[in-house]
Amino acid sequence: MSPFKQNQPHARTTVQHKKPQPKKAQPKTVRLNLRARVIVLLQQVNEGQSLNQILPQALEQTPVKDKGLLNELVMGTLRHWFALDAQIQPMLAKPLSDSRVHIALLLGLYQLLQTRIPAHAAISETVEAIKQLRLDKASGLINALLRRATREMESIQASFTQHHGLPKWLYQQLKKDWPQQVNDISQTLRQTAPLTLRINSRQRSRSGYLQALEQQNIAAAPCQLSSDGIVLQQAVQVTELPGFAEGWFSVQDEHAQLCAPFLGSLNDQRVLDACAAPGGKTAHLLEKNSPALLVALDNDEKRLSRVHENLERLQLAGPQVSVITADAATWQADNLFDHILLDAPCTATGVIRRHPDIRLLRQPGDVQQTVQLQAKLLDHLWQQLKVGGTLLYVTCSILKQENQQQMLAFMARHPEAQLQPLSVEGAIAQEAGIQLLPQPQGGDGFYFCQLKKLA
């Protein structure tokens, strides 16, 4: 599957989103100031490119002292894009002819509202950026509107804070699906997500690793739902944490860590992890079990290389693990499986905190396209499951069409599928499965549904 991932390995989607537009000729980015580079990146996202395809290279080309600020300005402007736009639009006498001017206004206002950058510096650097992008005629407008914003900051801040921060179509769908929770959901999705580790229980205990962090004065706490999870309470460089190279831990959202316990004991069983790349859940299953065979399946060969890398680092590779490049919607196993984990392609609406460009890239039509793909995967993989075996269906979506409605439709097509009870603190029970919504300082939005094959 062609996933949508950046920081943590769980946002999956095969949907084609905004069709990339022909690239505009841009000045060489090495000559641009930092704000101009940010505008170029945001314009590429606005034209349909995902951030994980373009941000790493941009950071490589950025001086070390500026990397943090570039990342913050890109991620922050995307995170608050629609809330910022709601403040800018009333100031405009007429529509803007160049989207880069619009982006510059969003970027400038983000700096004024959400950073400690002095207002004069934020405005002057943003104006200079638009000049470097050869849009000199717009510099006066940007300067005037941003200065006006500084004078009206109190009212703008209040309106900005109250905005849901989502594209209209997505907010309306969430309001329909979760009328009681929609405001909390939308505000949580505007926050940054915590950095969560999953301790490799074959290498270290959670309590032992917490002690190792404490010895290095790194603030951390145990997760509440995952017995293997630790949430870090300060910014860190993951690769510099104790035991990274030795495979003591992985980075994984707390709610994503629930897949392994939901599947139960897999010892001496044949297990399929469908849509497995980059291997976070594959590794967790191997850390907790000793299956007779575990097949990690994905159609993205490049991303499957990360499965190999992760298994090697975590010291989990072995003859019982088979990593296969193939399409889970058509691949046929030689023998049936006792258990199947389908971490299904989805719109990734539950992980917008980690991937804020989803706000721009997702379109209303993507949902139905994704639902059709999920149904195809479910129907095909169900044929690969033994009678008496279980299938755990997982998404990082919070849209009911991809979750409860998908599974109710599947059970209507397959009366031999028996719903299995799942429960965890904080989950919302559904007619089929359970939904975990994004939690402030907690896990992302995830849906789980487990079925047993009776015949």
Image: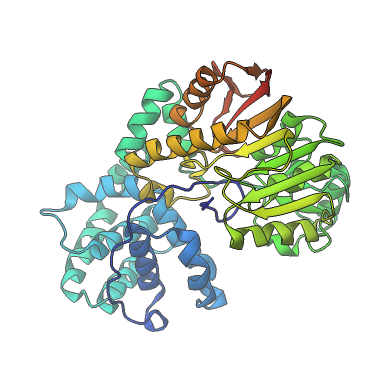
Q: Which of 391 and 213 is in front in this view?
A: 391
The outermost residue toward the front is: 334
Q: From this viewpoint, which residue is outermost toward the left?
A: 93
Where in the figure is residue 177, as x and y percent of width and height?
42, 24
Residue depicted at 74% across the width and 64% down the height: 240
Q: Residue at x 38, y 52 (%)?
A: 113
431 versus 37 height, above or below? above
Which residue is rendered at x = 86% and y = 36% of the image? 267
Q: Where is residue 82 in the image (x, y as percent from the top left)?
A: 33, 46
- Front one among 120 and 108: 108
Residue 231 visible to an observer of this rendering: no
Q: Is residue 258 left or right of residue 397?
A: right
Q: Position of residue 413 (x, y in %)?
A: 51, 21
Q: Can see residue 22?
A: yes
Question: Considering only vertical position in the picture, is 448 above or below 314?
Answer: above
Identify the image quadrant of residue 108.
bottom left
Closer-to-camera residue (94/176):
176
Left or right for 446, reference 211: left
